[in-house]
Image (spheres, rainbow, N blue to C red):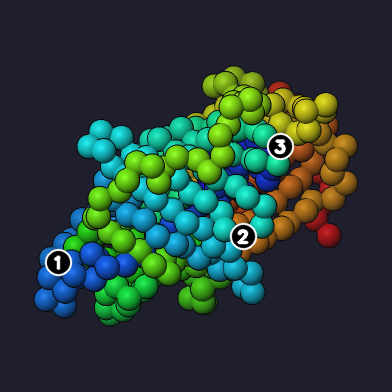
Amino acid sequence: MVAVASVRGSGGASCPLTLAWCWLLLLAVSSSAAAQSSRDTGGNPPARTEAQWLQAIQAAAQRVNFAGTVVYQQGGAMRSSRIVHLWDGTSSHERLQMLDGKPREFIRKDTEVHCLIPEARRVLIERAMPGETFPSLGGGAPREILEHYALRLETVERVAGVDCQVLVLEPRDAMRYGHRLCVEPASGLLLRTQTLDQRGEPIEQMAFTDVRINERIDRALLRPSWSTDGWRVDRSEHRPADLARLGWTISAPPGFRKLREVERRMGPPDAQRSTLQAVLSDGLATLSVFIEVGGGNQVTNDLAHSHGSLSGYTRRLGDTMVTVVGEVPPATAKAVAHGVINNANPAALESKPAR
């Protein structure tokens, strides 16, 4: 959900990965007060409609206090992070520490995220899309999600010692992945999410290994590990763009709507290029289309790539490079990339086929 960036829906600047990929690594949280709250339900899930289950998950990610450790697993690779989340009645505050690899922290207030990179003494500031990161579940209204996914309740399981209700979101077409969720019934907090391929097999998952829910959060736990005095502060540079006015048409898959269009400066500091970005979503899955005019010489053949639930496809349109990245099956990323049209220069549509 995913992004992409994640693009996880989102992407552009780097941290040091592109933010699209950085956001895919934002995880979160597990156990004690939650165990008691789940016992209070008497072992039966609350009587909620399909839309109310989705509303509960989305609300809990913003308005429930929680803290814990999350594991992100993709094939044989595994990463962990520690998260603290506070709702102060007005705003959502969060601190996410990556526990593997190079030290990284993400400090968030509502949609503004500060990515701390200590070895470079650098802070990168970016605006996140609502619902981008675990334990959120997309930014779309439940009604929008249920147009493209069928929801059913399954058994009650345990995650991090906490009872949780299993929900399955089955895609209504082959353009999307399915999802298996495990939700703490009383709070609505999402404790585990699995992305399922077309065979129903998990291709990646995020889950709490320990969690505290609805306990008091000390604000000192939201402070960064390092003093950032004297650090370089960069804001992800982007401005609104109108791709249609600039001569571009993007054929979105059925059910995907355009969330935003921006122009970014991307690439290394000494060789940055202007890049157009469109973010599309069906309410749950998100994908980004990047159009880099003048970048076509970087591509000789179409290139498909995938990593867990994240699929990408790059192709050349004349002197332009088009890249699609999102939490969708590879065929969807390819279809979107081939649906990008340069209205000002239709001949630019001619590109070498993928091998």
- Residue 127 seen from this side: yes
Q: Where is residue 66 in the image (x, y as percent from the top left)?
A: 32, 54
Mark 1 or mark 2, which has the lower sequence index?
1
Q: Position of residue 115 (x, y in %)?
A: 57, 39
Q: In which quarter of the image is residue 290?
A: top right
The structure residue drawn at horizontal position 24% and vertical position 55%, both measured from the top left corner, is 214
Residue 245 locus on image (x, y percent): 59, 19
User: Number of marks in the image?
Assistant: 3
Residue at image location 83% in from the left, 36% down from the top:
296
94 on left or right of 201: left
Judge by depth and name the residue closer to the eye, 310 or 122. 122
In terms of image quadrants, where is residue 80? Answer: bottom right
Q: To which residue does mark 1 refer?
A: 46
Disc 3 residue type (three-letter): Ala
Q: Separation of disc 1 and disc 2 at Cα?
A: 37 Å
Q: Distance between the residues labelled 3 and 2?
A: 18 Å
Please give the name of the residue rendered at 18% of the width and 70% of the height, measured from the top-left corner. 36
Of the residues under marks 3 and 2, which one precedes in the sequence? 2
Whether label 3 touches label 2, CB < 8 Å: no
The kind of residue tagged 1 is Pro
Q: Quadrant of residue 270?
A: top right
Q: What element does badge 3 sit on?
A: helix
Disc 2 residue type?
Asp
Residue 170 lies left or right of residue 341; in this view the side is: left
